[in-house]
Amino acid sequence: MPLVTSTEMFKKAYEGGYAIGAFNVNNMETIQGIVEAGKECNSPLILQVSAGARKYANPVYLKHLVEAAVETTGLPIVLHLDHGADFEACKAAVDDGFTSVMIDASHHAFNENIEITKKVVAYAHDRGVVVEAELGQLAGIEDAVNVKAEDACFTHPDEVYEFTTKTGIDSLAIAIGTSHGAYKFKPGQKPQLRFDILEEVGKRLPGFPIVLHGASSVPQDQVAIINQYGGKMPDAIGIPEDMLRKAATMAVCKINIDSDLRVACTAAIRKHMFENPSHFDPRQYLGDARAAVKALVKHKIVDVLGSNDKA
């Protein structure tokens, strides 16, 4: 099976009341952990690559690693560009064989966002590639995304129909209270997703797939392991998983997960090196990291996304 687009995935997810996990990938072990979990859970997957990942790992390496994942599992897998900054970034991903791209022009004025997005859609659709765009801005820092809290804004439901109609996009990322990065909310704060906005967007765009960025939950057990073995992660909490599960039963068809993977990797490596200070073989500690990613992704697929047995 070759790489696929998200079109059929999202149609089934919308109708079935579940979401597809869009997991950020940077290296071989992360990809292997994700797809091993997907295979065991029989779940479709979106493997997404940020600008930082493309720079770190080389897009050619990443593409062939993802193609290897398809070949070894037979799962329906989308290769997606996360947060394409401009037309050129999206064009490069399309030309490199990505089956899905995100153009993030949400920091521009509404009409300019439409014009930039339309240009990407025209180029991508001519080549059989689907496009995600964003309305509203999430706060937080992750790779190339850096939005101050005072600059963040919720998506306006009154704008979504015009935006999707004029641009021709295939899915829409909205801002309803999620946040990029691991440090979302301090203990004592109560994260709240604006389900009223999500519900209203769903009414304005019936059947249209909605995307949540910044949806990592920051697993506290993994943070505790990092700090136990010499780390200094500050106290912070992410998006409660019950809220994400509720969103997946509504219009949300794609939920992005990145920080949780990084935290799980780091916890496994720190623990391994502390308990085995004489080890110097990367296969030993990266093997533990791969296993930690696999366990995390299986949990997300079954308990949060509900995409198990949907491949």
Image (tube, helix red, strand yellow):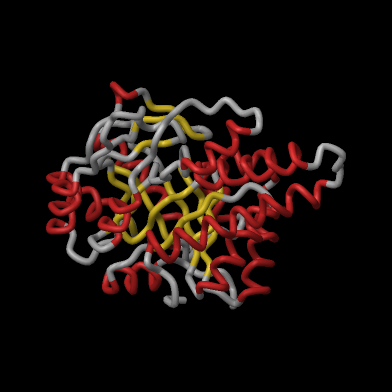
The answer to whether 229 is drawn above or below residue 38 in the figure is above
Percent from the top left, x then y, of residue 3? 56, 69
Residue depicted at x 32% and y 31%: 108
Image quarter hosting the N terminus: bottom right
Q: Is residue 294 left or right of residue 189?
A: right
Percent from the top left, x then y, of residue 171? 33, 57
Of the pair 78 and 268, the residue shown nearer to us: 268
Q: How many marks?
A: 0
Establish if 24 lies above or below 11.
above
Q: Kindly identify the residue that appears in the image at 45 percent across and 30 percent down.
A: 141
Using the image as rendered, state which of residue 190 and residue 5 is in the foreground: 190
Q: Residue at x 51, y 63 (%)?
A: 298
Is residue 74 rendered to the left or right of residue 148?
Answer: right
Q: Residue 293 appears in which quarter of the rendering?
A: bottom right
**In x, y percent, where is residue 237?**
39, 36
**Residue 311 drawn at (x, y percent):** 47, 76
Q: Which of 94 and 32 is in front in this view?
A: 32
